[in-house]
Amino acid sequence: MQILKREQIKKLVEIDTKRNHYDIDSLILSQAVGLYEKIIKDSPRKVLIVCGNNLNGDCGLLLADLLKKRSKIDCEIIHYCLNNRQYCSLIKQDGINVYEQIRDIKRAIAENDYIIDCIYGIDLQERVFYPYDLFIEWINNKEKSYVLSCDIPSGLNCDNGTIYGNCIKATETLTWQLGKAGMYLYPGNTYCGKITIENIGISYQSIEEIKSNYQINDWTDIKKMLPQRYSHSHKGTYGKVLLIAGSEDTTGAAILCGKTILKTGAGLLTVLSYPEVIAIFKQSLPEAMTVCLQNNIIYQMEHFDFSHFDLVVIGPGLSRSKNTEILLQYVLKSDKDVLIDADGLFYLKNNLSLLKREQLTVITPHLIEYQRIFAYDSSRILEDLASILKIYQNLIIVLKSENTIIAYRDKVTINTCGNNALAKGGSGDVLAGCISGFLAQRSDLKSVIAAVYVHSFAADLWLRNHSPYSLLASDLIGCIDEILYEAVKEKEKC
């Protein structure tokens, strides 16, 4: 599903209102109806609607009118400038209580446990100002309250996820028609709570005219992206992977990555590493073939034959040494697809020119690693990614975060599943293995997107029967197997 930025949303509304001959007031009413239906399902005894002096505030006023006329739910309004709005007379006719004085507003927020945030919408482009900054602070400081934001939490930049000084911490956000990019980027995603996308009647034809480079996916999309298995096939059909990983003190990272590569479908795995790592591989993963790194690594790599492999994976547990940089340089000079993770990323800053290559290169940095390689500005992350990928045409960046970003050329996918159980050593090695296993079978962007989703979804699957405290990276591999098993079963039913 595509997600939009502010100007794209405005363009979408402009196109659809002209195509279907309605005005903005009709759209605001449709939004109010969406909020009304949500509230009716929740059946609160009383609702407090906090309105701004804008279109989002008008939506809140129409919502209050609907609740008054169509339900038994008691509602009150906070509106600092009600007399300036076109629906002022409607609210007065309904006899709905409106709080306009600061002291009364503070008390009303303290006394209500179901609050509707209609303070700002997507048009906010400056720091939240008085008195709305106080309203937001009072709402956020309440305990055990349910806060429903209209379209986007007030105070959130809908383009990049940054905060305009203060922002509503919503329990749930009811967003209109399509998601907004800033809702899925950190820190914006931590303010939205549960995100529900509500259809407000904008036509499919108009949506099709807005071409966005940003998207999110669900399981239905991902199942179509998984590499396919064929009845008439052999181990070579599903890719030959060379894994350069591990060192004396970090053999676990290499084992986790290697095992995941095979468990996610790669046909053959060869491990190139130090003798002490190879010895453990022979015991822990006998399915892998092995090659020992020699003392003279430069000589060995000068004569190494990469032609036997479809994909080279370098980095997990490899250690930060001159040998790692030498290996990285030779790998990037090869004519094979490459995935770089962990310690391989440490030396990338000094070798960026090698990323200008014809073959596909995938890097999987977390934020600190990314900052070491490229300049980082959270308010410009999408624009910066686009600039970087214009330079490195065949580079895929998997920026690991709370919602991982997968960027390739002008396309950005934001992964929305996963949880904090993944915040544990070894999770990244399993992710590198999952991406590599899929890439070995089919070398394209869809394989990377699917692998990131499956890896994160595995952590969600774990929480169905376990706590987030207990997940080990090795447990993830089993959960990934369960997910792929379910995908196969669902496909067979079709």
Image (spheres, helix red, strand yellow):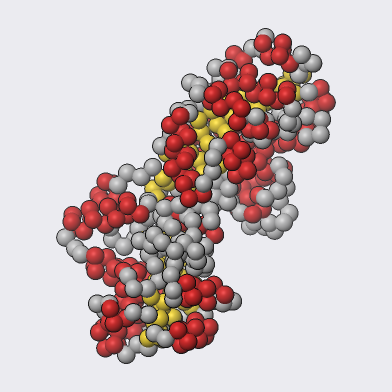
How many numbered dots are placed on residues in this image?
Answer: 0
Residue at image position (79%, 16%) is 295
Q: Quadrant of the C terminus?
A: top left
Q: Nearer the viewer, residue 490 or 256?
A: 256
Query: Quick check: 270 above or below 52?
Result: above
Residue at image position (27%, 77%) is 85
Q: Nearer the viewer, residue 189 or 220?
A: 189
Give the residue at the far left of this rendering: 21
Where does residue 56 sit, x and y in percent of width and height? 35, 69
Where does residue 95 sit, x and y in percent of width and height? 32, 90
Give the residue at the far bottom of this rendering: 95
Query: Quick check: 372 above or below 15?
Result: above
Q: Quick check: can you spot residue 270?
A: no
Write down the quadrant of residue 477 in the picture. Answer: top right
Residue at image position (54%, 40%) is 375
Q: Is residue 334 left or right of residue 291?
A: left
Q: Quick check: can you spot residue 463?
A: yes
Write down the quadrant of residue 336 in the picture. Answer: top right
Where does residue 203 sit, x and y in percent of width and height? 26, 55
Q: Nearer the viewer, residue 111 or 237?
A: 111
Residue at image position (55%, 37%) is 374
Q: Is residue 32 left or right of residue 482?
A: left
Q: Nearer the viewer, residue 493 or 70?
A: 70
Where does residue 459 sit, x and y in percent of width and height? 63, 50
